[in-house]
Image (tube, rainbow, N blue to C red):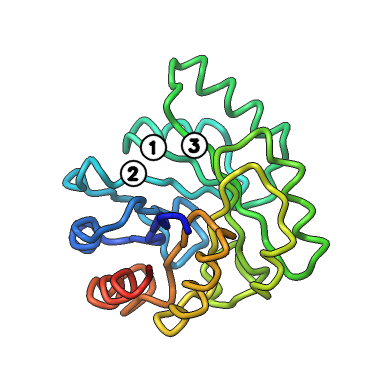
Amino acid sequence: MSQIKFKVCGLKYPKNQELVGQLPIDYAGFIFYKNSTRYTKQVSDKLPESVKKVGVFVDEKLDFVLQKVKEFSLDVIQLHGNEDPNYIEILKNALHEKNIFFVQIWKAIPIKNASDIKKIELYNKDIDVILLDAKGKHPGGNGVKFDWDLLQSINSTTPVMLSGGIKVDDVETLNEINRKNLIWGIDLNSGFEINPGLKDPGKIKHFINRLN
């Protein structure tokens, strides 16, 4: 059984970002997709160094992505749209041209059925983490799950982060999934909110403490 990584995504408000940053999490996610209710223009500069900053982008122009990486010293670029391997290669080259070599690239893949799992193979060699989310009306934050039994059919050399509709009462199921070493990390979002973009630190802490 591996030590699960925790990411809290969709952090919109700086003071709330700071409160969540004090929890035992590994990644804090900030959405730079303007059509999202969790879109933020601010990232607190008071987050602990131990919490890596993830910028979430959806089919965005490279200049905008690079601007946000520089503006907020992002550690991770999470691509949550229809970005293909060619886009990722161009993005990597653009980062390297600016002497940025430390930023990881994650790719979200929307899942509905077994055929969607196969799309992982398209990205395996090009990215650092695969994030599996449920297909929904929006690119993310839909608050719904896909069939987690599909995780057993994954054959990936790339770490897998589970996202989509995760709530406090999913702890037992997630502990079982973790015992089987099917995932590397868990992405918490809408199931741990007071309002869109405003997280409930107590609920997040309670969830993390129960996951082993």
Residue on which the image places disc 1: 75
C-alpha distance separating marks 1 and 3: 12 Å
In the picture, the disc for residue 65 is 3
Measuring 68% from the left and 73% from the top, which residue is drawn there?
Answer: 149
Q: Which of the pair 17/106 is nearer the observer?
A: 106
Image location (x, y in percent) of residue 97: 51, 14
Q: Nearer the viewer, residue 196 or 49?
A: 49
Question: Tag 3, which secondary structure?
Answer: helix
Few, some or many C-alpha atoms within 10 Å of disc 1 (few <14, some 14-19, many ≥20)?
some
Tell me the kind of residue under disc 1.
Answer: Asp
**CA gap, disc 1 to disc 2?**
6 Å
Sequence-first tag of 1 and 3 = 3
The residue positioned 74% from the left and 70% from the top of the image is 112
CB atoms of marks 1 and 2 within 8 Å: yes
Disc number placed over residue 52 in the picture, else none? 2
**Is residue 75 toward the left or the right of residue 93 in the image?**
left
Q: Is residue 24 above or below residue 193?
A: above
> Mark 3: which amino acid?
Val
Task: Say whether marks 1 and 3 touch (CB < 8 Å).
Answer: no
Q: Nearer the viewer, mark 3 or mark 2?
A: 2
- Residue 164 place in picture, x, y as percent: 55, 70
Q: Is residue 160 above or below residue 63?
A: below
Is mark 3 in CB contact (under 8 Å) with mark 2?
no
Circle 2 SS class: strand
Amino acid type indicated by mark 2: Lys
Residue located at (44% from left, 15% from top) = 99
Position in image of residue 204 (x %, y %): 30, 72
Residue 67 in percent (x, y) is at 42, 32
| Image quarter (top left, top right, bottom left or bottom right) of the C terminus | bottom left
Which of the 4 quarters of the picture holds residue 133? bottom right
Determine whether the residue tagged by mark 1 lies in a helix, strand or loop: loop
